[in-house]
Amino acid sequence: MEIDDNIAGAGMTALDTAVFLACRKSVFERLHPEIKQGGDRRSANFENQTDIMSFCSATAEQFGLSDRHVRRLVAAGSALKPKDITALRNAPKPVRLNDLMALAKIGEADEREAVCVMIGGGEAKSVGDARKIHAGKPVPVKDPVEEAFKTMLIAWERAPKKAKRRFVRERLDDLRAAGLIDDPEAAAE
């Protein structure tokens, strides 16, 4: 019940949710060992003869999540060791579910721990980058100016003609000040 209160009552990160759901699953399996062993959910071992749902289905229904989402969170939370969780909690930005899923797929505990330490220390922004660093491969560095240019170019290409004209009128002084547009009035003087 305490785990359920924590999950339902707090705005938790994906990491916290994964850890709590993995813990909740462990408790659920202790309370219902026949489900863990793949037994009949309607067996006489249950006090209540109604259908008892699997852990993920029951949790998904209780917390308003999809069954798949719960399974992914549980897999991620179950794969992490206490050291990994501590390292990830120290990360400059909250760890995303995609990164948690990638961590759960790392088979070697030593590599997983190294990746968690890199993410927690801010050496890597994602699990993919941390795995490349761990393997000794270079991680490409993105140029912020190039990224901003690409974003502006995409917005320009998607904008309607009226919006483009308005943008140029609004930013004409900036473009002239940057020397990007010749000022016909200044040339006449």
Image (cartoon, rainbow, N blue to C red):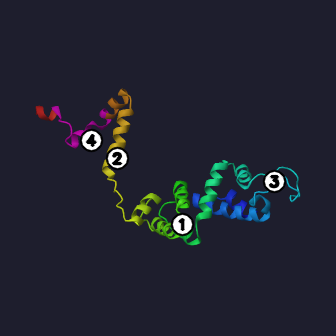
Q: Quadrant of the N terminus?
A: bottom right
Mark toward the start of the polypeptide (3 vs 4): 3
The CA distance from mark 4 to mark 2 is 17 Å
Q: Residue 184 appears at what percent x and percent y?
A: 16, 32
Q: Which residue is mark 3?
A: 41
Q: Is 64 one of the magenta-colored residues?
A: no
Q: Is residue 161 left or right of residue 10?
A: left
Question: Please, is residue 77 above or below residue 59 in the view?
Answer: below
Q: CA distance from mark 2 to mark 1?
A: 30 Å
Secondary structure character of the magenta stretch overall: helix
Q: Residue at x 34, y 47 (%)?
A: 148
Residue 181 highlighted magenta (yes or no): yes
| Highlighted magenta segment, given as a residue range | 168-184
Mark 3 lies on a secondary structure that is loop
Amino acid type at circle 4 is Asp
Amino acid marked by disc 2: Ala
Q: Indicate which disc residue 89 carries.
A: 1
